[in-house]
Structure formats: C-alpha cells, structure tokens
Amino acid sequence: MNAQIDNAGFNARHAEQAHLLQVYSQYDFEPVAASGVTLTCRDGRELLDFYGGHAVASLGYGHPDAVRAISAQAEKLFFQSNAVALEVRAQAADKLAAFSGMDRVFLCNSGAEANENALRIALRKTGRNKILALEHSFHGRTAAAGAVTWGAADRWYGFPRTPFDVEFISRDDVAAAVAAIDGSVAAVILEPVQGIAGAYVLGADFIQAVAGACKQSGALLISDEVQCGVGRCGTPFAIHLHNVRPDIMTTAKALGTGFPVGAVMLSEDVAAVLGNGDLGTTFGGGPLACALINTVLDVIERDRLIDNVKALSARIKEECVVGPVQQISGEGFLLGLRCDGSAAPMRNKLLSAGILTGSSNDANVTRLLPPLTLEDKHVDALVAALKSI
Ligand SMILES: Cc1ncc(COP(=O)(O)O)c(C=O)c1O
C-alpha cells in the first residue's frame, strides 16, 4: 500500500513517555496505517503482521466488511446500554451461541473481564471456594483472572491475597489433575492451547480426563478461548478439537477484530443460577461491538476462513522448520516457532526482513498469531525470510 505518511520525523515512543505510564516494553516502530496483513510504519517500512495485533486482527486491517459495519452502525445508533434491548445485540448473541455450541451469552469488554465473570459464576453455581488452574496459564490482569494466572503472584499481581483458593496443576499429568478435582473444587480453568506460554497444546487425553472428572465431582470446566478461540485453532473454538463441551467458555480479542469486546458463554444449566442484577457492565454488548461481532462471525463463515487457517497452518508446519526453527507447536494460527536457544535473535532478524512476530513466556519460542485472512503469498514470504537467516 502507498499510504501518505504525515509528520514523518515524529517519534511516538518519545512522545508517549511524557505522560503515559511506562508499563509496556515496545517494538521499535510505529504503525501509522494498515491494510490486510500489512502494516505501514512512520519510517515508510512495510511489515507483514504475523503477530496480528496480539491475536486481535482476525479479519486483518481495514477489512471492507468491518469498516462498513462499524460506520453504518455508528451512523444509525452509536451507543445504548443494556438498559434497552437491541436487535444488533440479539443477533450477536444468537450468532455466538450457534458458533460456540453454548446456550447463553453475556457480553463484556475484554478477556480479563470475561474470565472474572466466568470465575464468579462458577463459585456461585457450586457454592465452593477453590479454583484449579494450570501451570504456565495466562488468564488476565484483574483480581480473579490474575489469581489463576501462573506466576502472577511473583511478578505483578499486587493484591495482598486472592479472592478464592487457587491451586495450580501440571498441564501434562493426567492422573494428578484427576486426583486434584475433588468435591472442594468449583472449577478448572484452562486454555486448550496455551497462548502466552508459547502455543502449548494440551493433550486430548488431558482435556477429556479433566472434563470427565469435573462432571463427576460437580466442578465446572471453564475454557478460556480469549486467545485460541474464534476460528484461530482451525475449529470455531479450540475445545472443539477434543469434542468436549465446557460448562463455561470465555473469549475476546479476535471476536471484535480490533474493537474491544469480550464474551462469556454458558450452558443453560449454569445460566440458571443467574438472575436480574447478578452481572453487569455499561459498555458490554454496545451496538458498535455487536455490529463487529456479527461481521466477524459472518465473514469467517462466508469466506471459509477456518478452512484457510487449516490449510495455511499445515503449510507453515510443513515448510517453516528451516533456518533457526527446530520445531513448531500449536494449532491453526496459534503457532510457536521453537529455536534451540533464545528466539529473540530470530525475531529481530525476521523484523529486519519485514515480518513481525510475537514473543512468549518461553524464551525459545516465537509466536505466530496472524489474521485468519492470511494468504499463501504471506507464508511464502515467511518461509523465504526464515531460510535466509
Ligand atoms: C488466554 C488469555 N486469557 C485472557 C487474557 C486477557 O485478555 P485481555 O487482555 O483482553 O483482558 C489474555 C490476553 O492476552 C489471554 O491470552
């Protein structure tokens, strides 16, 4: 693309330092425009975004359907809260229920908020006080979501105590997991494909055994699909890889292709414990968010994007174990390129070659989280760049 770049010498990182709280380590470029999978930077460079805005840009950038939907909705009705019923919200809930195979939907604004509500619902439904989470998990930064995030207490949690009892279990010890799920456990929360951990796929036997033990002990299974959901893993939601129906599912990120959205999806049985006033949010389920949820789910179906994910993921797994890449983990478009040592030098070289990828909590793994609209020519470019390292 040939975007006109205004104010070419401006340094956004420097400008941000004046007043923004400095809590993020940042890449050394500023995107000023984007189209499809390509970012245009202020210095004129173009980058192929295999990081996808941190798994958010499901339809890529400036998708004509998304732009049309948000513009049309903004002109018609920019905002109304949940104090009134809206056609566009009813449509979003219907589509999300159909896409997820769940019965009921609560719309909110982010992944952490979705998990916060999912955990609250599980505690309330069971009357129990303990949540089991997995080692290496990430579920968000709020009080409850952070409480079930592996390592948060040591690094950034900040609250003096967690709001409920938490126990972390190994992600590959089936017997230990089953043994831990007893009558004191309200819920097990897991990411079927752990994202920030470095695209780690939980085994089918692990997930199925955990689901079975939950059923037996009356604990709920919460599938956190904030990063791995919405078609990213080659199925509508990643838990569908294992034919398991959780009691609660959460999602966010890709669902709004860049507009902040979050969703909790529930079985009818779990939903039955909730009534008027039990959950709430001002912005969740707003008309702009719902217009984008409708568009994302429609375009995924119309353009067969899940088939695209499966085909191109297979190509990446087949062709990208080259150069410094020793192994590829993950599913669909949540992939981890594993190097022998630190993956940072490879990430930097890919960036110099015009390909943006993401880090992970595993220092040897670089994550790929590209838009579901990725094309063969982009995979060609990735393969060529890796070969040249
Ligand atoms: C699996 C998972 N859950 C929850 C979250 C938190 O989502 P948010 O940043 O929208 O609060 C993330 C964010 O990266 C995530 O990857």
Image (cartoon, rainbow, N blue to C red):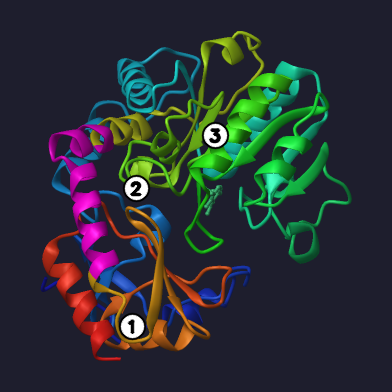
Residue 20 belongs to the span the image colors magenta: no
Residue that badge 2 annotates: 232
Residue 30, horizontal then vertical, whole percent: 36, 76
Counting residues from the start of the chain, the first of labels 3 and 2 encountered is 3
Residue 140, horizontal then vertical, whole percent: 62, 49
Residue depicted at 52% across the width and 84% down the height? 342
Res. 351 mark: 1
Vertical relation: 9 (above or below) 122: below
Q: 10 Å neighbourhood of mark 1: few (<14), some, or many (≥20)?
A: some
Marks 2/1: CA–CA distance: 23 Å
Vertical relation: 174 (above or below) 42: above
Residue depicted at 30% across the width and 91% down the height? 389
Work out which residue is located at the far bottom of the displayed protein and give it: 389
Q: Is residue 160 left or right of residue 212?
A: right
Counting residues from the start of the chain, the first of labels 2 and 1 encountered is 2
Q: Looking at the image, which is closer to me, 11 or 335?
A: 335
Closer to the eye: label 3 or 2: 3
Marks 3/2: CA–CA distance: 21 Å
Query: Which amino acid does the dot numbered 3 rest on?
Result: Gln
Q: The N terminus appears in which quarter of the rendering?
A: bottom left
Location of residue 348 (image quadrant): bottom left
Residue that badge 3 annotates: 208
Query: Which amino acid does the dot numbered 2 rest on?
Result: Arg
Q: Is residue 217 left or right of residue 388?
A: right
Circle 2/circle 1 CB separation < 8 Å? no
Q: Which residues are magenta?
A: 296-318
Query: Which amino acid does the dot numbered 1 rest on?
Result: Leu
Q: Is residue 5 visible?
A: no
Res. 330 mark: none
Location of residue 179 (image quadrant): top right
SS state under label 1: helix
Residue 5, horizontal then vertical, whole percent: 21, 77
